[in-house]
Image (cartoon, rainbow, N blue to C red):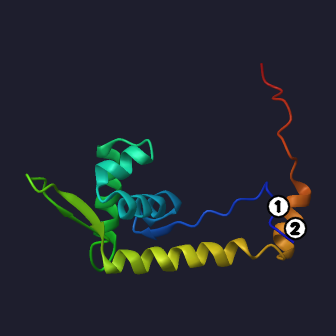
């Protein structure tokens, strides 16, 4: 049995008040791997360079080592790459997502899905 479409589990790994890893940051790491730069990854995700850089900064500050290494731009080009630690964190995060998405036999999930409407009722305000 597959998970009901109206229940979405979102995993956020916290480091103090910061989100060290979540679905968006995992997607950003994958985009950096593909595009070889923070700016290219940001463009691919329809995100500003500043926003992408800030997300990378949080990730790099929350783990035992950086998840992304950058090299300054020059005539040879700059760029960014996912570090071995970043690859490991990403792999473990994706495995955890996969494991939890396969937990559709959970009675609590079934009970919540049965009690929830497919769409919200119209607002009674105004």
Point out which mark residue 120 bears: none
Q: To which residue does mark 1 refer?
A: 4
Which mark is first along the chain, 2 or 1? 1
Q: Provide residue 69's location: percent of width, then percent of height.
A: 23, 68
Given residues 104 and 33, the one toward you in this image is 33
- Tell me: 103 left or right of 89: right
- Tell me: 79 left or right of 124: left
Within 10 angstroms of label 2, few (less than 14), some, or many (20 or more) residues? some
Q: Residue at x 84, y 41 (%)?
A: 119
Say what secondary structure mark 2 lies in: helix
Give above or below for 91 relative to 28. Answer: below
Q: Looking at the image, do the residues carrying marks 1 and 2 touch, with CB atoms under 8 Å apart?
A: yes
Q: To which residue does mark 2 refer?
A: 110
Quarter of the figure that contains the C terminus? top right
Q: CA distance from mark 1 to mark 2?
A: 8 Å
Q: Quadrant of residue 77?
A: bottom left
Quarter of the figure that contains the N terminus? bottom right
Q: Provide residue 13's location: percent of width, then percent of height.
A: 49, 70
- The total number of labels drawn is 2
């Amino acid at each position: 049995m597959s998970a009901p479409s109206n229940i979405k589990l979102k995993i956020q790994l916290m480091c103090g008040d910061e989100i060290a890893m979540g679905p968006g940051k995992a997607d950003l790491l994958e985009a950096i791997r593909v595009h070889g730069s923070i700016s290219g990854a940001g463009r691919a995700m329809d995100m500003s360079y500043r926003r992408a850089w800030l997300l990378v900064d949080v990730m790099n500050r929350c783990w035992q080592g950086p998840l992304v290494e950058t090299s300054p731009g020059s005539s040879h080009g700059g760029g960014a790459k996912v570090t071995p630690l970043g690859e490991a964190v990403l792999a473990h995060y994706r495995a955890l997502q996969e494991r939890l998405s396969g937990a559709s036999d959970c009675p609590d999930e079934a009970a919540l899905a049965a009690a929830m409407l497919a769409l919200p009722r119209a607002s009674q305000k105004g």
